[in-house]
Amino acid sequence: MDLFDANNIDDEMRIMSENARQEKSDLTESIILDNALSSFELAKPNLVDLGTPLIKVIELFQNKSIGAIIVVKEGKIRGIITERDVLLKITGKGLDLEKEIVDDYLTPDPETLRLSDTVAAAINKMYVGGFRNVPITDKDQRPIGVITARDILAQIANHFPEEIINIPIHPQRLAPSRTEGG
């Protein structure tokens, strides 16, 4: 009877521990999604003016190892050009990169966010629009940063370090059943 009671206590302790972890996870997840983008350490945006030759844009991508460049006119955002744009619209087209200008290859009037917007809003905008980089602007549409999918992933990993660090290198995989052709 003592063994039975010990098993019950162990089961109860395990259940309580799992519930506490779930409550912590739910609370932490909610806090992360509600955080304002001002909680991020955003690098200054990389900017070029309308009319910039593509060769300068590509050199900036190469020298800075960045994923997006904001295109401005008189300090206000007019477009964005990403590494994906370069790959899909420019590479292999035989263009004269010294004569072609960024204006013809950028995404005009991109979706933007403000520092007061939440992480959830950024994730939504990225998911719905298929973006990896979203400019952050002030009230006058002047770029003050860029939030990236990597930034958001890093913040989530920092809030769940125990869960991330303790994932096995080779997660358990289910063995195929005999009916799956084995």
Image (cartoon, rainbow, N blue to C red):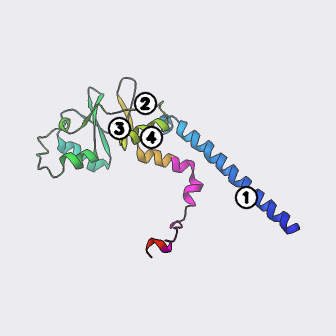
Q: Quadrant of residue 105?
A: top left
The numbered disc on residue 14 is: 1
Q: Quadrant of the C terminus?
A: bottom left
Nearest-to-viewer mark from 3 and 2: 2
The x and y percentages for residue 163 are 58, 55
Q: Residues within 10 Å of mark 2 (few under 14, many from 20)?
A: some
Kindly check if marks 3 and 4 are in contact, taking CB atoms under 8 A apart as contact: no
For the point 39% across and 36% down, the residue is: 145
Q: Is residue 148 above or below residue 13?
A: above
Seen in the image, is 8 located left or right of residue 110? right
Q: Secondary structure at mark 3?
A: loop
Q: Residue at x 47, y 72 (%)?
A: 179
Q: Nearer the viewer, mark 2 or mark 4?
A: 4
Amino acid beneath label 3: Pro
Q: Amino acid at mark 1?
A: Arg
Q: CA distance from mark 3 to mark 2?
A: 14 Å
Query: Which stretch appears magenta?
Result: 156-178
x then y, percent, for residue 129 = 36, 39
Q: Nearer the viewer, residue 46 or 152?
A: 152
Residue identified by numbered label 2? 114
Q: Position of residue 42 (x, y in %)?
A: 43, 40
- Tag 3 residue: 45
Q: What amino acid type should be assigned to the residue bearing mark 2? A: Arg
Instruction: Pick out the residue farthest to the bottom.
Output: 182
Disc number lying in front (2 or 1): 1
Q: Is residue 20 above or below residue 80?
A: below
| Image marks 2 and 4: residues in contact by CB distance under 8 Å | no
